[in-house]
Amino acid sequence: MSSTTDSAAGRAEIAARTLRTDRWWLPPLLNVIGLGAWVLYATVRAFMQQWYFVPQYNYLTPFYSPCVSNGCIEQAAHFGRFLPDWPILPYAALTLPFLLLFRLTCYYYRKAYYRSFWLSPPACAVAEPHRRYKGESRGPLLGQNLHRYFFYAAAIISLINTYDAFHALFKADGSFGLGLGNIILFANVVLLWAYTISCHSCRSIIGGRLNHFSKHPTRYKAWLFVSRLNAKHMQLAWTTLGTLALTDFYIMAVSAGWFSDLRIVG
């Protein structure tokens, strides 16, 4: 077995890949399983093109929001229908790519999939299998620097999801209604906002280019709030994957008639 260190750099040559005796491989493995399962589910649902809307209660899954395809149910198309109805084109093709790019370029997700899928490196004090490391200075990883702009797009999409949640408070006949689906929609929106504004780019935007926080007390308080959320960015990243899947599955189940929505009012 060849050495994993560079003797020319004056370091001790260690033949073993790592001297760690703990289960360092478990977190990368769990990341592969978790992220892989979510991507598989989301991909299937995005291209399924059915069971995405409950007309009676105006429940629209976030995986299909905004529904802008000509194939969308008219009642679900809150912002019009202008994309062609092709089987290979998701109904929410206008926003899904930006959400994907926002997550792919997220600082936490970079760490997660760099370590789990690329093994670069798989864990601290564990040598990676790659001979050279180019970092994010060349393509395609150079595109990670666009994360700030994908954040703006994600914020706009979160506004759309918020609109969907409020719109669902009124049933098809215009009367107010509240069910378990509404609670799930709002819980998902709140957590999506928490994940979005806990982004490192958002923290930089709010507190950046300031020499004296004392002269900008409002921005300072906002920066402190975002900083507290930023400390939970990893947990929010995983939690929102769960709430997105749960919200979509619940609406799919109600739309497909697998079970009825638990109504509280109306």
Image (cartoon, grey):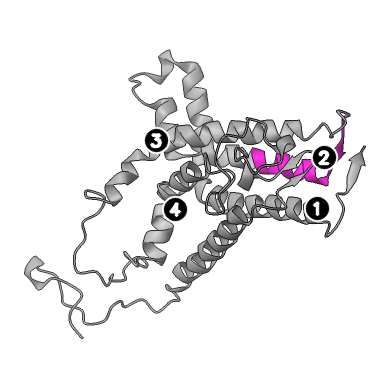
Q: Are marks 1 and 4 in contact (CB under 8 Å)?
A: no
Q: Residues within 10 Å of mark 2 (few under 14, many from 20)?
A: many
> Looking at this view, is 199 or 3 the one in front?
199
Name the spot of residue 130 as percent of width and height, x first.
24, 69
Badge nearest the viewer, 4 or 2: 2
Residue type for callout 2: Tyr
For the residues labelled 3 and 2, say whether their Cβ atoms are less than 8 Å apart. no
User: N-terminal of the two: label 3 or label 1?
Assistant: 3
Label 4 SS: helix
Lateral position of residue 142 relative to residue 95, left or right: left
Which amino acid is tagged 4?
Tyr
Say which quarter of the image contains residue 143: top left
User: Is 28 left or right of 130, judged from the image as shown?
Assistant: right
What residue would you read off at disc 3?
148
| Residue drawn at the location 67% of the way across and 44% of the way down | 188
Disc 4 versus disc 3: distance between alpha carbons? 15 Å
Magenta residues span 176-189
- The residue under label 2 is 57
Helix, strand or loop under label 3? helix
Q: Decide: is 8 above or below 250.
A: below
| Marks 1 & 2, CB-CB < 8 Å contact | yes
Residue hosting label 4: 109
N-terminal label among 1 and 4: 4
Between the residue at mark 1 and the residue at mark 4, the CA separation in whole angstroms equals 32 Å
**What separation in Å lies between label 4 and label 2 (alpha carbons)?**
35 Å
The mark found on residue 254 in the picture is 1
Residue at 39% from the left image edge and 79% from the top image edge: 21
N-terminal of the pair, mark 4 or mark 3, is: 4
